[in-house]
Amino acid sequence: MRKRLFVVLRSVLAGWGTLLLLAYLLEHPVLVWTTPILGVKWLATAGLALDCMALAATGWVVGRVNRPDSLLGVLTFAATLTFWDLTSVVAINIPWLLRLVANALRDSVYLSSLLTTAASQVLLFASLFTGGLLSRPPSKPVSIIR
């Protein structure tokens, strides 16, 4: 029990530290620097791509810090991302997605916005889990010789 609590605490601290560091020291300056080159039309796409890379790197760090329990660490950190509007850090906003679901159930006008938002949220969380899976130790190679 204490080991799992330590994994959870270490995951949350390493994940938030890495994510905030990457977002504010790397991602936001790169977006400011490249906006005149890419143009305003591509700003959202470049921001989503950089968010995916930042989340993949964060997932890798969280998984690496919790090497034997990398999946538990990444799941724990991912759970902490679902409670707040994090659009100032990364494009994750689960409360907004839940409101869109409620609105889409009442009126079909919101359906296209719901699908777009859900797809971007799935892409961002998939990037986080992919980084976590890449941090696992390599498996023993398969041999044809006994």
Image (cartoon, grey):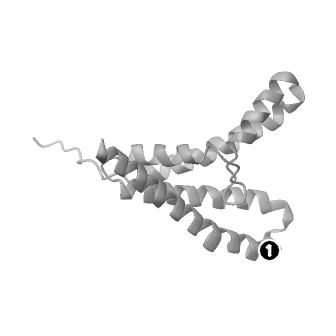
Residue that lies at the very extreme toward the top in this rendered image: 106
Q: Is residue 143 left or right of residue 133?
A: left
Note whether 49 is above or below 126 in the view shown.
below
Quarter in which the N terminus is drawn: top left
Residue at image location 74% in from the left, 77% down from the top = 33
The image position of residue 15, as x and y in percent, is 50, 57
Quarter in which the C terminus is drawn: top left
Q: How many marks?
A: 1
Note whether 96 is above or below 21 in the view shown.
above
Note whether 50 is above or below 132 in the view shown.
below
Question: 146 or 81: nearer the eye?
Answer: 81
The image position of residue 38, as x and y in percent, is 79, 69
The image position of residue 28, as x and y in percent, is 69, 69
Question: 26 or 140: nearer the eye?
Answer: 26
The image position of residue 71, as x and y in percent, is 40, 44
Mark 1 element type: helix
Q: Amino acid at mark 1?
A: Ile
Quadrant of residue 120 in the image? top right
Residue at image location 87% in from the left, 25% down from the top = 108
Residue at image location 42% in from the left, 53% down from the top = 9
Badge 1 crowding class, 10 Å Cα cut-off, few under 14, some 14 to 19, many 20 or more, is few
Note whether 46 is above or below 114 in the view shown.
below
Quadrant of residue 103 in the image? top right
Q: Is residue 120 left or right of residue 141?
A: right
Residue that lies at the very extreme toward the front in this rendered image: 2
Q: Which residue is mark 1?
A: 37
Q: Is residue 138 left or right of residue 84?
A: left
